[in-house]
Amino acid sequence: MKTLDFLLQRLAKAILVVLGVVILNFMLIHMAPGDPASVLAGEAGAGDEKFIAQLRAQFGLDQPLYWQLWTYLKGVLTGDLGFSYRNQVPVMTLILDRLPATLLLTGCAFVFSLVLGILLGVIAAYRRGSVADSVVMTSALVFYATPLFWIALMSVLVFSLHLDWLPPFDMESIGANYTGWARVADIAHHLVLPTVTLGLFFTAVYTRLTRASMLEVMALDFVKTARAKGVPKAQVIRRHVLRNAILPVFTFASMQAGQLVGGAVLTETVFAWPGIGRLMFDALLQRDYPVLLGVFLVTAAVVVLVNLIADLLYRFVDPRIEAAS
Amino acid sequence: MKRRVRLLAAAAGLLCASMMGTAYAQEVPAKGGTLNMIAQPEPPVLMVGLNTQGPTLYVAGQIYQSLLTYGTDLKPLPSLAKSWTVSSDGLIYTFTLQDNVKWHDGKPFSADDVVFTADKFLRESHPRWRLIATTYVDSITAPAPNQVVFKLKKPFSAFLNAFELSSFPIIPKHLYEGTDYRTNPANQTPIGTGPFKLKEWKRGSYIHLVRNEDYWKPGKPYLDELYFRIIPDSASRAVAFEKGTVDVLRGGDVEGFEVRRLIKLPDVENTTSGWEYYAPLVFMQMNQRSMPFSDKRVRQAIMHAIDRDFIVRNVFFGQGKVATGPIASTTLYYTPDVPAYPFDLPKAKKILADAGIKPSEYNIRLMPLPYGAAWDRMSEYVKQQIEQLGFKVVIQGVDAGGWSQKLADFDFDLTFNFTYQYGDPALGVARHYLSTNVIKGTPYGNNQNYVNPKVDELFALAAGAVSNDVAAKAYSEAQKIIVDEVALGWLYEMQNVTINRKKVKNLVRTGIGLNETMDEVWISK
């Protein structure tokens, strides 16, 4: 199949998937007990029946569910994700405010874990059975098994409170008003702890995957042939083994990339990172339906988009896939 | 002679030293500086007329003001009203406003703003004020630009206590009149009369307020700017204080066990003062629509089965005081002269046995208040104690939205809740006991279905009393009946701890604590 046909077909499917996700989420959210009017009334200190009814009417919650869904879908098609009941700000504004911070954090964690994970996996496979292999694999197992929040809190305790090397939270120094490169450096400084914390689990996964996959490929005949022909070991590893062993890693990386938007709630919470995960969590507690639906929509769109890109890249990484299709 | 001279010299020296000591003790307020605090959780909006959550009040209390504020003894103090009079029949309240007050956008503040706030804005958007206005207020007028007159339909003994920031924030008429209050763009750029103006709000990160140079109190505020940091994790908030990133921790900012540790840090002080007006009181709500809780002897037995002192000491780390009844000890008209329910498990079992009640026949659904680990621990403890009486108890966990929905639908057996008292029982207490407040669809009324016409009558008598003595007598009698009948299971009065660096002066001055305008707060150099 031609790449363009493939792309168009996948795009059409992607749009249907996102639409399905929106409708499903809409129904699920409305099935949960409690609604934003009762939560807001509680916050007002003494929600009487009349006040709650007034809020429901204002938010359109007194309309039949199918009508609310239709109104919402019409809005989505015109790029309007609605108005936050709680924050009294358009949902799109709230999401666009937070999205860059999350993408920066998850993007850095993604690159960090992918690069380090593959590198450590290659070293472990290359030096199988050595001390280096044992150290790498034991560390990978530890970070794979340790809860993320514990790593986060311990890293704050050690690197911020005791050693005072790194800032414990925030995305930048509040009140410092840095500009230009000074600001970039400041943000980079603040990025270290959350990036490493978020990335360690995936680093461990990539390390283990790369090592296992490499060892499998290294046992194949073509590798022995290459070595027998006199190709240096390092070159065989780089050009032949890694290239063939990378596919499972690539599959897992596309899954991690799908979590770029919604996968950092815990890290954002501990490090006071002003991202979208926290926005979603607060919206869930407050039953802020439009914000929740908006975040879910963006998350679904990113997952679908990343999968599409991954499918395209597969054909590039492994030409046999295109040939087969 | 020489000895006498030496003695005189020593006395003079001591006098000088003591005078110098006095001079040092009376430090002169310093101008300037930045105060760093935490807003937890992040307020959804800073327009306090639309949201009166704790964090909103904390930040918006620096932007908006009310007519009055209240001392730790709950006596009214001037804020935007410099004086007030009450007619002898208790029907006319006349407030004279401060001079030269401007809104943050430079427009003059006047009595018209107060009338708009009371008659239009809060009537529509503020349920507590709407209840007062609808029940008691006949008219609100502005006979002069600096004078507002409230004429009541009938006396209301709590009326003068209803003008604190969360109950009556004053809204600029020129920005809100004729608009949809909830979607008004001014909600994002709040304009008040307070000592600080909103400079920037980076959602998820911080709220930055700066000094209002045109503030109506000359020479105030002392501080240049305030930062309210958004730090969602409790452990990180403790680290922020420890590292000096923030100077103040408000009650609830950190876990109870952290409070014990942080107050021992050098150069740190703490107080439980500043909550007298709100006086949050925690209670169990037992649904009296069916057995076993429809029988007051079961409720009495359960009160005896729970060691409330244990809850305060071990679950909430001593940050509270066992409650004796519906009115907190700092609220007006409190009386300790009510039936007591000391922890006495054998007595609890005997009450049930004497009543012929077989606890094993009842399954109780216990719905925790979803406010965090300490509340979960309390639920587990209460479950364990009630099970000791022989009842079968199942914990039914829900989130905040689910909790309020189930409470509003009366779909619960036993849950926990707490109430702010707002200085006077008519404002924050009566709502949980009046039979007229058993309303399905609202989560914060008499959801347990306690009905006693005598109590209704006493609350009405007290609320409508012109004389304090009459009100006090009626409230005393009501408290005795309510406590005897265990209308709710009162557990403890929260004693939230404010922790701050010693360099921050004058932080807690009134009964509304950190919600008070910080125009007198300064930082020692």
Image (cartoon, rainbow, N blue to C red):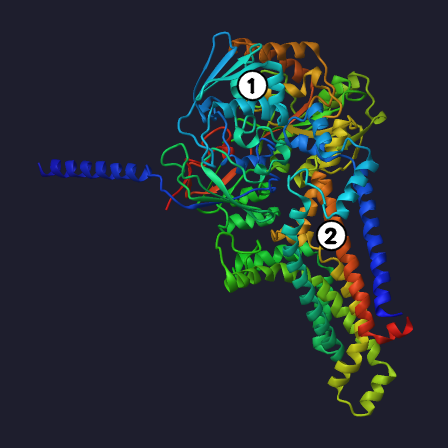
Pointer 2 local density, CA inside 10 Å: few below 14, some 14–19, many at least 20: some
Residue at the image point whose x is 68% and y is 24% from the top: B489
How packed mark 1 is, by other alpha carbons closer than 10 Å (few <14, some 14-19, many 20 or more), is some
Q: Position of residue A142 (x, y in %)?
A: 71, 63
Q: Do the CB atoms of the residues marked 1 and 2 lie less than 8 Å apart?
A: no
The amino acid type, in three-letter code, at marker 2 is: Val
Distance, label 1 to label 2, CA atoms, is: 54 Å
Q: Which residue is mark 1?
A: B334
Kind of residue at disc 1: Tyr
Check residue A298 in the rendering and tell me which mark sits there, or answer none.
2
Figure quadrant of residue B436: top right
Q: Is residue B202 above or below residue A307?
A: above
Q: Quadrant of the N terminus of chain B?
A: top left
Depth check: give the residue in front, A301 or B8: A301
Given residues B9 and B395, the one toward you in this image is B395
Examine the rendering and report whether any part of residue B393 can be seen: yes
Q: Is residue A151 above or below residue B421?
A: below
Helix, strand or loop at disc 2? helix
Q: Residue at x 61, y 36 (%)?
A: B316
